[in-house]
Amino acid sequence: MAMTLKAPKTVVHTPNVPSVVQAAQIAIVTMKLAKVNRWEELQARDVAELRSIIRWDPEQLELLQKHSSILRVLQVSPAVTVYACPACERFGFTGPGAKTGKCVFTEGCDGSLVRASTMNFKPPAKKPKPSSSST
C-alpha cells in the first residue's frame, strides 16, 4: 500500500498589525505545526522536513528574519507571545491570560496593545449583501 503525502500547511498571519506581532504569530503557528515548544527546537529540525509540512511566503520569511531576535523568547506552552503598540511601535512579551488594553510602554501614548495570535489568521466571513427586491 502506497503512503500518501500531505501537502504542506500554509501559515497565514494577521495583516495590519505591527510587524513584530506578525513575526511572532508566524513563528508560533509554525512551532505548533512542527509540534515543537520553542524556536530552538524548530531550528534543530531538518529544513527539508520542515518544508514538507509548512509553507511560508517570502513576506513571512522576511518578517521572521527582521525580528529574529524575539524568536528565542516565544513559547507554545505555557504560551509566551508578543504584544505591541501600533502607535509608539514598542513591544513586550506576555504570557497566557494577559489582557491587552491601553499602551503601557510609553507615557502619554493613546495606542491600544495588540497581541500576537497563536492560531492561523482567518479573515472575517463576508456577509452576503441583501438583495434588493423590486416591487
Image (cartoon, rainbow, N blue to C red):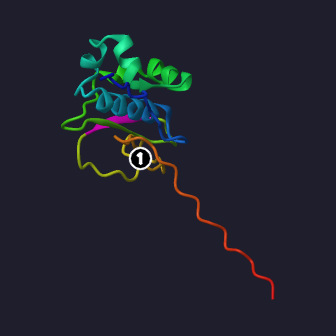
Residue reaching furthest to the left = 78
Q: Which residue is mark 1?
A: 113
Viewer-nearest residue: 115 or 46 = 46
Q: Quadrant of the C terminus?
A: bottom right
Q: Quadrant of residue 106?
A: top left
The quarter of the displayed image where residue 7 is located: top left
| Location of residue 35 in the rendering, given as x and y in whole percent from the top left corner | 25, 28
Residue range in magenta is 90-94
Instruction: Kindly state the secondary structure of the residue where label 1 is placed.
Output: loop
Q: Residue furthest right?
A: 135
The location of residue 37, given as percent across then percent down, is 22, 28
Q: Residue at x 26, y 35 (%)?
A: 80
Disc 1 residue type (three-letter): Leu
Residue at 38% in and 53% down: 101
Q: Is residue 125 above or below residue 42?
A: below
Residue positioned most to the front:
1
Judging depth in this view, the residue of 64 and 31 nearest the camera is 31
Count numbered badges in the picture: 1
Is most of the magenta stretch helix, strand or loop?
A: strand
Q: Residues within 10 Å of mark 1 (few under 14, many from 20)?
A: many
Q: Position of residue 81 (x, y in %)?
A: 31, 36
- Check if residue 12 falls in the magenta segment: no
The structure residue drawn at horizontal position 44% and vertical position 33%, both measured from the top left corner, is: 11
Where residue 33 sits: x, y (%)?
Answer: 32, 31
Task: Please say if 87 is above or below 125.
Answer: above
User: Which residue is more in the foreground, 84 or 39?
Assistant: 39
Quadrant of the drawing holding the N terminus: top left
**Who's the residue at 24% across and 24% down the image?**
38
